[in-house]
Amino acid sequence: MPDTLTVIDNRTGKEYEIPIMYGTYPRYGAAIPTTDFRQIKVSEDDFGLLGYDPAFTNTASCRSSITHIDGEKGILRYRGYPIEDLAVKSSFLEVAFLIVHGMLPTRAELEEWSHDITHHAIVHENIKKFMDGFRYDAHPMGILISTVAALSTFYPEAKQIRDMAIRNEQIHRLIAKIPTIAAFAYRHSQGFPYTYPDNGLGYCGNFLSMMYKMTEQYSPDPVLEKALDVVFILHVDHEQNCSANAMRSVGSSLPDPYVSVAAAAAGLYGPLHGGANEQVLHMLQEIGHISRVPSHIKKVKQGDIRLMGFGHRVYKNYDPRARILKEMTHRVLGVTGKNTLLDVAVELERIALEDDYFVNRKLYPNVDFYSGLIYQAMGFPLEMFPVLFAIPRTVGWLAQWAEMLDDPDQKIARPRQIYTGDDVCEYVPIEDRLQAGGTNVIRG
């Protein structure tokens, strides 16, 4: 007999059996189809029972095989592969293939995939003209979002989302062109001429070249290139976060992927999502010196300020991505030079991990705590931080989008609401309405 949940409506005394659904592995959680609650009514004209879950804190909006997180144990896996293995043993493009196609590529598949991505990195000359229209001080993330949406007009065939060959080509284009647009957005903000992609460089090396090349000769430092590759791997996907949810929600109306990615990037733009590592750096700069860490901790415990980069909506243990980035931060600073902010960060982490106040609240370092230090050491300005997040996350968004399109359970996103307004209002002609502050409706 299948597992069920017995529900008794105390309003009517009626009993209902609701089926319990499982994923591939029961230990990863169970769910109930909330539409089955619609049958629970007081009367025939009753709409039926709804689930109320603001921000989807305990509601599964889809079934997915892309990413698994166990926040209690500090586990993150892409398609079943531990993030620790992928960060050490794979390249970003290899992980991108895994995320999109569901399996690690053979050598031949990786070479073909890398070729397809590399040779789509160039953008139409009109894109450059489009980007030239932004103010000199326009935020790079705003430029990125607008330009990605504009790509929709350059590839009208992208609307044929059910054609797999066309769909795959748009995936190649987006993964390839996002770094180019991101680098162009930075160069625009600096007043520098745009640097075209170099097909002889790898994915991350090419991005660094487009960012920083000022002469004919440019070779990215291998340590910095590898660090960026690892940071990108760690940011590829993270279940149904705000931006992934935006990608699926907008994509459910079946537009082309360019506008859906633009919507996802807009969701990433906020300080609670893609801008979190920027807030960490602001905090470290405000502390300034290791001697001031205890007083900062005291203010946090008093509730005067927040400890940025600690705690996570999902992780109730040490974020596995933070462990990897902590080691990578030391490697990067070995190339770029000592950074006093790293001393502040290490001391802040030491105290927080030993203090019962933070331990009891399960406030462990998250991925944002060290990624900002790496970005700053590599010369990226603060306003580029969310852009750097968007580059690798585009891969995850596209995988979420493709999975959603192929899921027969998915329909156009249309959440319900609990209406809290007036019932029926009698219209009052404008000459009979009271002054502002008074009532001007007759409520039913």
Image (tube, rainbow, N blue to C red):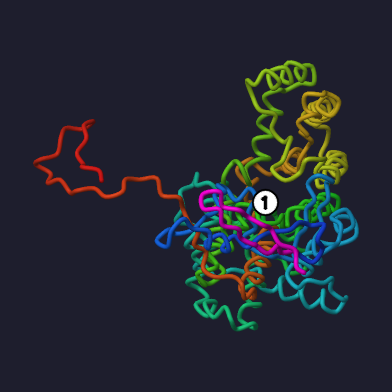
Q: Position of residue 23 (x, y in %)?
A: 76, 64
Is the stretch drawn in magenta largely helix, strand or loop? strand
Q: Is label 1 in a helix, a strand or a loop?
A: helix
Based on the picture, tell me whether residue 6 belongs to the magenta stretch.
yes
Horizontal side of 253 relative to 76 (left or right) equals left
Disc 1 marks which residue? 388
Q: Position of residue 246 (x, y in %)?
A: 56, 58
| Kind of residue at badge 1 | Leu
118 versus 85 height, above or below: below
Q: Position of residue 331 (x, y in %)?
A: 88, 43
What residue is shown at x 65% (from left), y 52% (from top)? 241
Q: Position of residue 362 (x, y in %)?
A: 78, 34
Horizontal side of 206 relative to 130 (left or right) equals right
298 versus 178 height, above or below: above
Can residue 209 be seen by looking at this rendering? Answer: no
Horizontal side of 439 relative to 392 (left or right) equals left
Can residue 227 be seen by looking at this rendering? Answer: yes
